[in-house]
Image (spheres, helix red, strand yellow):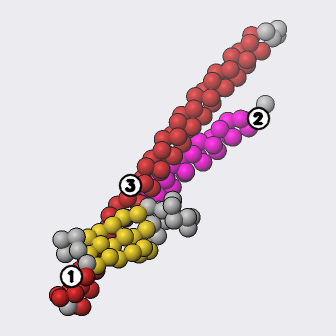
Amino acid sequence: MTNEPFTAAATLDEFLTRTQQALSVMRSRPAAHADDDADELLRADGTAADGLVRAVVVQGGRLESVTVDPGLSAQGIEAVCAHIVVAVNAALADLEAQVSASAQADVDALAARLGGLQEQSRRQVELFSQAMESAAARLGGGRTG
């Protein structure tokens, strides 16, 4: 009799352990959205100059729009540009927080499922081992020497 079932179970356990380690590394990285469907992308906005400047960014770090109240033109172009930079940076910071939270939730859910699979595989290996020991005991007890 070979130990192939035990080897396969150990390999599965090792695979799940490595996968969970990889997920731990992923938790620290914000996820980029590969889909270009604008309706599915996360959005964030930022404001400056008491709401007179508004910037909207979408997932992937793209600027979607900038709105500037015409009344700000009296402050001069440099001041308006500075307000735009503040609004865009605020929007990007909000977007980064949203993306990180979304990715974290996805990774946490996957990690929880993998942890459950790992525990389930351990229980199955234990049950299989017990069944094999029981069968071996019955076979050994039924021999006449």
- The residue closer to the viewer here, 19 or 133, is 19
Q: Quadrant of the N terminus?
A: top right
Q: Earlier in the sequence, mark 1 or mark 2?
A: 2
User: In the figure, is residue 31 to the left or right of 13?
Assistant: left
Q: Is residue 78 above or below residue 14?
A: below
Q: CA distance from mark 3 to mark 1?
A: 37 Å
Q: Earlier in the sequence, mark 3 or mark 2?
A: 2
Residue at numbered disc 3: 101
Q: Looking at the image, which residue is at 55% across and 67% down?
A: 36
Numbered disc 3: secondary structure: helix
Q: Is residue 122 visible?
A: no
Question: What numbered label is drawn on residue 44?
Answer: none
Q: Residue flagged by tag 2: what amino acid is it?
A: Thr
Tell me the chief SS of the magenta region.
Answer: helix
Q: Residue flagged by tag 3: what amino acid is it?
A: Ala
**Residue 142 location, x and y as percent?**
79, 9
**Residue 112 location, x and y as percent?**
48, 41
Numbered disc 2: secondary structure: loop
Numbered disc 1: secondary structure: helix
Mark 3, Cα crowd under 10 Å, few <14 / some 14-19 / many 20+, is some
Residue at numbered disc 2: 2
Mark 2, Cα crowd under 10 Å, few <14 / some 14-19 / many 20+, is few
Q: CA distance from mark 1 to mark 2?
A: 83 Å
Magenta segment range?
2-28
- The residue closer to the viewer here, 141 or 61, is 61
Q: Is residue 141 visible?
A: yes
Question: What numbered label is drawn on residue 71?
Answer: 1
> How many numbered circles are shown?
3
Indicate the quadrant where residue 66 lies.
Answer: bottom left
